[in-house]
Image: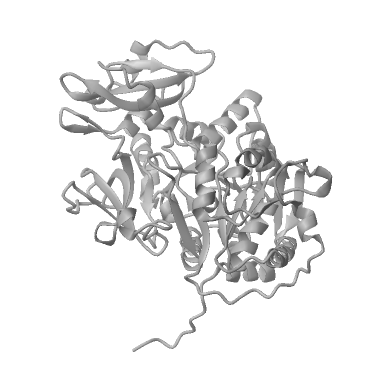
């Protein structure tokens, strides 16, 4: 027997129509290259989205065409998200921080037809355009007065492109399983892989992340997505804010600037913001150097890399609560979110900190398990450590143009490549990446736990740990640190500092100081580059 309920499709168009009807006056504030503080509303943005959809139709775009963006977080990028997907095309966000050869590979693999580009990235595309085999033209995200001279073929100014188009558009009735957007992994091994999201997966992810124990977005919230829109849908906030009526504040090209972030928080009354740890380190440093306060700012969501306890404590001083989230491009991206259970707030500080450092609690919509090397499921006891696997309606079942077998799907589960523990309350902790795990004397050492412990030292800005060859133990951890500019710690003191904070046999025998630790295009520490840098090192 089937239920007698309506079967309306779950589409991004439904989010747009709802926000346009209910939250038309909600503000969108943007920092752009041509305007330090642009103001619009959801209503105005969706009027322009209709103009953009008409302009795309005029170009002759066909259903399923991939339309690419290389752009910062701002109102024009917001318009692109909705106009492209709701017209039946695929919004392909490209990370401009990737190597040029990776960008070329991604655009050609996706067979992008048109590219919308921020003026800052025009030179990048000018150098690459001869190798972009499918691109028919480029639209530069600016107005005519700020349109740069360019050698890009068929280059147009965005504002001119949409200016004469009507705001009314006959949005197509889309199947909820239609492709909506495309994002490629950063490709730390081999070529980047494409993850093709559907309207259904995007809407379900929006509902899951907007739940009360997750982001809990509402019309009372002012949200600043510092996490870039060019990577995994800005963690879903572009849809979540529209569905809940949250005011949006976009930092544009200033997403890593502590002074700009503090000014936006204070002037726009930002209450929640999302970004990688380096973003919040930049903000904390600015606040401490200037004595600036951020009274409206209550919650910072951290993802993309492990969050050190020292950063949490620094934000606590400013009455900002850090919440760790974990996910992947292949998961749309969110899989866990760290909200403490009520009784955990009554724990002694050190016990509470252990929970705060975990990657978060499993959220509804994602199923999760850890398995041993034979694929046998391990218990959720907080002790057993194994390969982390996930499945759910917003988890990819195959990479774009690849067979499902290549998406690491044993028994229908996606293998994340992470090693983790899960405790009885559903809190997951990443102990390592499978390719980064250090096996010393037959036992695993968590490089992440060693890094977190080292980051507690007051003279350290950043720390990373890799495994290096050892004649007796096969591998031993090597601590690599960036010290604060005016500090001069001794390596013996740093290693001694770890005593009592981690298992004694996990403590590295050596510590190396470097000027900079390499990062991937998405802001994660690049262990691959570090291993290359220290490939000649051995104990």
Q: Is residue 160 above or below residue 252?
A: below
For the point 44% across and 46% down, the residue is: 192
Q: Position of residue 97 (x, y in %)?
A: 55, 38
Q: In what quadrant of the picture does the N terminus appear?
A: bottom left
Q: In what quadrant of the picture does the C terminus appear?
A: top left
Q: Can residue 278 be seen in this snapshot? A: yes
Is residue 149 found left or right of 428 in the rendered image? right
For the point 28% across and 33% down, the residue is: 446
For the point 15% across and 20% down, the residue is: 472
Is residue 533 found left or right of 273 in the rendered image? left
Q: Is residue 242 above or below residue 533?
A: below
Is residue 365 found left or right of 11 in the rendered image? left
Please state which of residues 423 and 534 is positioned toward the viewer in this rendering. 534
Q: Is residue 290 above or below residue 231?
A: above
Q: Residue 62 appears in which quarter of the rendering?
A: bottom right
Please state which of residues 308 and 419 is positioned toward the viewer in this rendering. 419
Q: Position of residue 443 (x, y in %)?
A: 18, 32
Q: Can residue 297 be seen in this snapshot? A: no
Q: Position of residue 21 (x, y in %)?
A: 68, 71
Please state which of residues 479 and 64 is positioned toward the viewer in this rendering. 64
For the point 28% across and 20% down, the residue is: 508
Q: Residue 244 appears in which quarter of the rendering?
A: bottom right
Is residue 14 found left or right of 524 in the rendered image? right
């Amino acid at each position: 027997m089937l239920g007698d309920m309506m079967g309306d499709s779950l589409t991004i168009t439904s989010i747009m129509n709802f926000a346009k009807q209910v939250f038309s006056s909600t503000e969108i504030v943007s920092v752009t290259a041509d305007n330090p503080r642009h103001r619009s509303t959801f209503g105005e943005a969706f009027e322009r989205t209709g103009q953009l959809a008409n302009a795309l139709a005029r170009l002759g775009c066909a259903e399923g065409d991939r339309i690419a963006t290389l752009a910062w977080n701002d109102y024009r990028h917001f318009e692109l998200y909705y106009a492209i997907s709701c017209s039946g095309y695929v919004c392909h966000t490209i990370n401009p921080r990737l190597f040029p050869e990776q960008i070329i590979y991604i655009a050609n693999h996706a067979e992008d037809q048109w590219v919308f580009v921020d003026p800052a990235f025009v030179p990048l595309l000018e150098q690459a355009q001869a190798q972009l085999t499918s691109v028919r033209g480029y639209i530069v995200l600016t107005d005519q007065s700020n349109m740069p001279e360019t050698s890009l073929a068929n280059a147009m100014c965005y504002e001119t492109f949409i200016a004469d188009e009507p705001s009314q558009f006959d949005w197509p009735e889309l199947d909820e399983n239609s492709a909506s957007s495309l994002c490629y992994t950063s490709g730390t091994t081999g070529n980047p892989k494409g993850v093709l999201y559907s309207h259904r997966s995007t809407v379900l992810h929006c509902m899951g992340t907007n739940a009360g124990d997750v982001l809990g977005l509402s019309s009372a919230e002012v949200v600043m997505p510092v996490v870039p829109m060019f990577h995994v849908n800005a963690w879903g906030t572009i849809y979540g804010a529209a569905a809940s009526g949250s005011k949006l504040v976009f930092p544009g090209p200033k997403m890593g600037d502590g002074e700009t972030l503090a000014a936006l928080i204070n002037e726009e009354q930002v209450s929640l913001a999302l970004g990688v740890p380096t973003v919040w380190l930049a903000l904390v440093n600015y606040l401490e150097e200037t004595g600036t306060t951020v009274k409206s700012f209550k919650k910072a969501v951290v993802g993309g890399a492990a969050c050190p306890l020292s950063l949490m404590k620094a934000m606590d001083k400013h009455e900002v609560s850090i919440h760790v989230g974990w996910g992947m491009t292949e998961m749309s991206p969110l899989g866990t979110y760290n909200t403490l259970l009520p009784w955990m707030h009554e724990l002694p500080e050190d016990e509470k900190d252990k929970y705060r450092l975990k990657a978060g609690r499993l959220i509804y919509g994602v199923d999760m398990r850890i398995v041993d090397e034979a694929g046998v499921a391990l218990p959720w006891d907080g002790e057993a450590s194994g390969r982390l696997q996930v499945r759910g309606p917003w988890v990819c079942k195959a990479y774009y143009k690849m067979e499902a077998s290549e998406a690491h799907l044993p028994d229908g589960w996606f293998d994340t490549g992470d090693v983790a523990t899960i405790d009885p309350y559903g809190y997951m902790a990443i102990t390592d990446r499978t390719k980064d795990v250090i096996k010393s004397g037959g036992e695993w050492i968590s490089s992440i736990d060693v890094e977190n412990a080292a980051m507690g030292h007051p003279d350290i800005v950043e720390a990373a740990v890799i495994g290096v060859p050892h004649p007796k133990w096969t591998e031993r951890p090597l601590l690599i640190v960036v010290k604060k500019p005016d500090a001069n710690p001794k390596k013996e003191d740093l290693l001694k500092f770890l005593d009592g904070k981690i298992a004694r046999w996990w403590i590295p025998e050596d510590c190396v100081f470097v000027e900079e630790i390499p990062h991937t295009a998405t802001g994660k520490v690049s262990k691959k580059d570090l291993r290359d840098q220290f490939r000649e090192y051995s104990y």
